[in-house]
Image (spheres, rainbow, N blue to C red):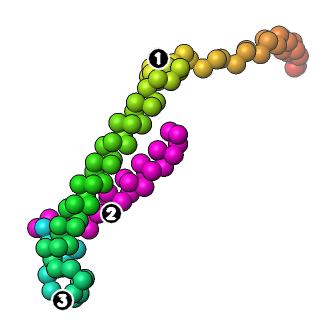
Amino acid sequence: MATLLLIIHLFVTLALIGVVLLQRSEGGGLGVGSSQGMGSFMTGRGTANLLTRTTAILGTMFFVLSITLALINRGGSGPRSILDSPPPAAAPAAPAVPVAPPPPAVPTN
C-alpha cells in the first residue's frame, strides 16, 4: 500500500513541478497573449485560470499524500530515527596470528 502511494506521490510531484514551470510570473500562463501559442483553443486568461486550478488541485493532492504516507509509516516496529538505531554488528575479529621474530642478523666481515 505504501509503495503504491509513494509511486502516486512521485507522479503528482512531477506533474506539480511541470505545471508550476509552465506558469509565467506575470500570470500570462504559457505565454499566451497572441494568436500563436494555444491558438483559438483558450484565451490567455483561460489558460492562466486552468493552470492555477491545476496547481491548486495538484498541491492539495501532494499534501494529502504526504500526510498519508507519514501516518502509514509512523507505526513501524523499527526505530523512529537513524540516531536511535543500534550500531551495526561488528564483524568478529580474526584471531591474532603470532608474528615470528625476525631471523638474527648475520654479521658481515
Mark 3 and mark 1 lie on one chain; the one further toward the N terminus is: 3
Give the magenta part as a residue range.
Answer: 1-26
Residue 71 quadrant: top left
Q: CA distance from mark 3 to mark 2?
A: 23 Å
Q: 10 Å neighbourhood of mark 1: few (<14), some, or many (≥20)?
A: few
Q: Please say whether residue 41 is one of the residues in the magenta stretch.
A: no
Is residue 22 in the magenta section? Answer: yes
Residue 81 appears at what percent x and percent y? 44, 22
Residue 89's spot in the image, x, y percent?
A: 64, 17
2 or 1: tag closer to the N-terminus: 2
| Circle 1: residue type | Asp
Marks 3 and 1, how far apart at CA: 61 Å
Q: Position of residue 58 (x, y in %)?
A: 30, 54
| Pointer 2 residue | 18
Q: Amino acid at mark 3?
A: Ser
Q: Which residue, given by chain and number where applicable, does mark 1 sit on? A: 84
Q: For mark 3, what is the residue?
A: 35
Q: Calculate the distance from the C-alpha at mark 2 to the C-alpha at mark 1.
A: 38 Å
Callout 3: SS: loop
